[in-house]
Image: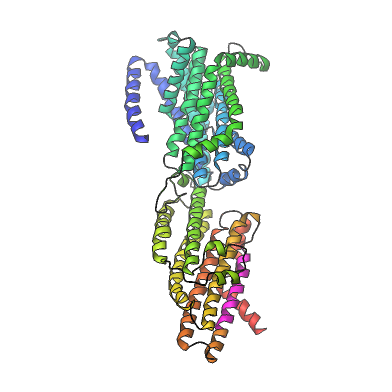
Amino acid sequence: MKYSLRRIILPITFLLLTYGFWVSPDFKEISAGVAIFLFGMLSLEEGFRAFTGGMLEKILRRTTNRLWKSFSFGVMATTIMQSSSLVSVITISFLSAGLIGLAEGIGIVFGSNLGTTTGAWLVAGFGLKVKISAYAMPMLVFGMILIFQPSKKLKGAGYILAGLGFLFLGVHFMKEGFDAFKDTLDLAEYAIEGLPGLLLYALIGIVATVIMQSSHATLVLIITALAAQQLSYENALALAIGSNIGTTITAIIGSISSNEQGKRLAGAHLIFNLSTGFIAIAFIHQFMLMVDVLCAWVGIAADDFALKLAMFHTLFNLVGIMVMLPLIGRLVDFLEKNIKAEQNKTVKPKYLTDSALEFTGTAIEALRKETTRIYHNSCDIIAQGLSMTTQSIFSTVPLDDVIKRHNTVIDYDVDAAYVEKIKGLYGDIIIFSGKVSVENEAVEKLARIQSANKKIIMALKDTKHLQKNISNYMGSDNGYIKDEYNNLRKRIARVLRRLNRLDTEQQSGASVLSFDALKVRLQEESSILHKRLERLIRANHISPEMGISLMKDAIYADEIVGDLIEIGSSLFYCDETDEVEAEHLIALDDDEIDEIIESGVSK
């Protein structure tokens, strides 16, 4: 869809521009103004991207746990960045990575639509009344100096300054171009009144926004043309409605590479803007009357059509939001019902999308969530490899009773389960990790996630080795060896249960340091097991062959337990705060744990 649309639009655009250049030299100045303005938008977006390596992610997490907060974030972010497109890309990226829910994402989109109206106010109230090209020059000079600095933040600030400079310069050229253009051709002569004009110019606004990929650019073009009296007021309103609908194409294109959540958000954006556009068209005369009343109330002159257009743009977006906000719950249900996740027989990645790669923070979180999926799948494989189920292990039933209930061997192919549930996802994670643009503060997080994936594979391999003898001795007539293998199963099941609790309780303040206590306890149990094993062999309760098998399998069990603890420590708490980072730094390593155990034994 994305490329076929471009193949149609690009040649038409070139033909129209070429014809315009041939007809009028003033059209060149208008077109150059639009081009400079769009380049300014790109520079502005590039600049703000430099500040999305952590700060924006943290702000977004903390400001989207309520609908009104996500709505406010959309308003403020778009007002500051002057780019609803960038806000849409960020929102789709966070939604695809599972950092925010669909309702919160819709709230951001609604807020973004209101925030984008500030651009019309700035241009109509400031850009047309002041010679802003004078402000553009120093911004461009200082911006370019900063762009060539090695610091990423300075580069970002440089792009923001240069972007603002190009925006101002673009507005200046458009204004000058339309002022000169009216001497050769009066476009206002082509004004169409009534419903036909409303629909036609709304369609033109949609097409213009689709071509330029920026409703800001379309609005600035409308405002400068209106100020130069090249457009009638009513036709300008219709163009503004069309630009509002056309801007959804950015979200639709951005969602093509995302998962079903990104597509649902793009669908919500389209539904909202279409509904808002229909409301504005259906009640255009009421809106015009309301604009006149409000403008008279705030002191805007009756013939200042540029500011009246800005008022109209804000007003119909605000009305659309007021209509749609109470319907967000129903909108979410509708989108989830009609845009469903792809059903595949093989396990496919859920969070590893191109949109999640837009920002380092969302890429890391996507990897963590996908690795968590692998971990949950591996828990099921480990449990069934030990002839148990995760349902019984994660229950509140005492583990001794769980072991007694699962006293028969489950015929389970660990290799086949690994191929079906783990191998493909693991390969996708490796490929995705190679695409992540890792920054200094994210290196440690990525390393822990990669380590967790390796530990999962190692735990599954050890489970396969352990499975054979567990299956052999579960039904043994020798009660001693049977009890010892049940103890191995119990040790692993205890860790799985404990990690499941920590996983589900991670939002309630469970500490990374609790893993140290778990490590120490399990190491103590391992030491006790080896002493008990020696006594069993000396007392002839088990044969030397049984003892050798048990010793080897105890090592496998120790490795599984150690890997599971490392997975939990790396995976469940790798993303949040500086406190967690500090806890990872002071967490005990294996040598320190051995020292603690030895000192405890000696006492």
The boundaries of the magenta stretch are 512-531
Q: Position of residue 382 (x, y in %)?
A: 48, 66
Residue at the image point whose x is 41% and y is 22% from the top: 31
Residue at 57% x, 68% y: name it: 402
- Left or right of 129? Residue 429 is left
Which part of the image, by quadrant, shows the N terminus?
top left
Question: On the picture, is 1 further left or further right than 81?
Answer: left
Q: How is the image coloured?
A: rainbow
Count the numbered circles shown: 0
Which of the 4 image quarters holds residue 30?
top left
Res 222 visible:
yes
Q: Residue furthest top?
A: 189
Q: Position of residue 368 (x, y in %)?
A: 51, 55
- Indicate whether residue 525 is drawn in magenta: yes
User: Is the residue 407 above or below the residue 59 in the image?
Assistant: below
Q: Position of residue 233 (x, y in %)?
A: 52, 13
In-front residue for pair 124/326:
326
Q: Nearer the viewer, residue 432 or 14?
A: 432
Q: Nearer the viewer, residue 456 or 479?
A: 479
In which quadrant of the rendered image does the C terminus lie? bottom right
Q: Main secondary structure of the magenta part?
A: helix
Residue 409 in the image: above or below residue 380: below
